[in-house]
Amino acid sequence: MAAPRVWDRSLPLRLATAGIAIPLLVWLILRGGPAFLLLVFVLIGLGLWEFYHLMSAQGLRPYRWLGLGTGLVVPWFVYNGLPTHANFFLTAFLLGTMAVELLRPRDHGVAPMSVTFFGLLYVAWLASHLLYLRELPGRLGLPYGEGAQFVFLAVLPTWACDTAAYAVGLLFGRVRLHPVVSPKKSVEGSLGGLLAAVVVTWFLARLWLPAIPWYLTVLLGFGIGAFAEVGDLVESLLKRTSQAKDSATWIPGHGGVLDRFDSLFFTAPLVYYFLVLAVFPDRLP
């Protein structure tokens, strides 16, 4: 067992960055429309660049520009309510990547194609669910502003989980959670994050979706916490196998987009399908 850490030197910079970035993110979520679409474009573009950079560090040679181009087309069709077009581009991208691989030496076989397509699904497809959430009221016949509530239902419990896991782990963490993947994460921090996710989810659901049974709210909160922590560990695995400390340095004190939004890429789809399948199954066309 390791002794708990009592101070993180990056904490002041992390707090300063959060003090600037969080109000901007909240405004973009509330605004919706093209402004929120631009945010998702930025997250996907930078996130894909970081992912392909990590894979290049492993010598896997992904098709960076092909993946970036397709990754920015998919959310555009999601935003415009054209899922068939998005599926078409994903299919064309898969077939095109396999064809392009024939044009260069096959020194890595299926690896370049695999990591290129995986990056597209991991970053672009998962992040596009933020748009699905924000635009969901249009499919439900609800006021457009309620889409911000759906996004916050994914964002706020995820942030609470990340923050609580960090704080509890910093103060009380002793038992390592998964030392091979992320030596600093602790079981105590993980439990604190799960509890925070459940509490925040329950509060938001009581406020915005009071008709949901309490046990489903608790289940959703637990799912958000679990998905958030798995998403964080997956990104840690990507960095460790690439021998990188951070995915990038875009965000002072936080690293890159994948470092900051990895958990949200996992929780946004969960919340979206929870709403579609468990809360509003009869209101969708």
Image (cartoon, rainbow, N blue to C red):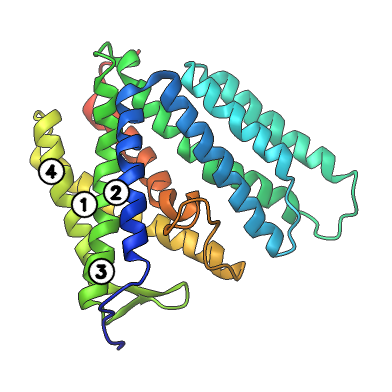
Q: CA distance from mark 2 to mark 1?
A: 7 Å
Judging from the image, what secondary structure is the residue with disc 2 in? helix
**Closer mark to the observer between disc 3 and disc 4:** 3
Ranked by sequence position, the earlier of labels 3 and 2 is 2
The residue carrying mark 1 is: 197
Name the N-terminal-most of marks 1 and 3: 3
- Answer with mark 3 or mark 4, whichever residue precedes in sequence: 3
Q: Which residue is mark 3?
A: 189
Q: Label for residue 97?
A: none
- Residue nearer the viewer, 27 or 196: 27
Q: Earlier in the sequence, mark 2 or mark 4?
A: 2
Label 4: which residue?
202
Say whether marks 3 and 2 touch (CB < 8 Å): no
Q: Quadrant of the N terminus?
A: bottom left
**Amino acid identity at mark 3:** Gly
Residue 247 location (% of width, % of height):
54, 58
Is residue 277 visible to the viewer in this orientation of the structure? no
Q: How many marks?
A: 4
| SS assignment at label 1 | helix
Q: Amino acid at mark 2?
A: Thr
**CB atoms at circles 2 and 1 under 8 Å apart?**
yes
Give the residue drawn at x 24%, y 31%: 278
Residue 158's label in the rendered image is 2
Residue 168 horizontal side relative to residue 232, left or right = left
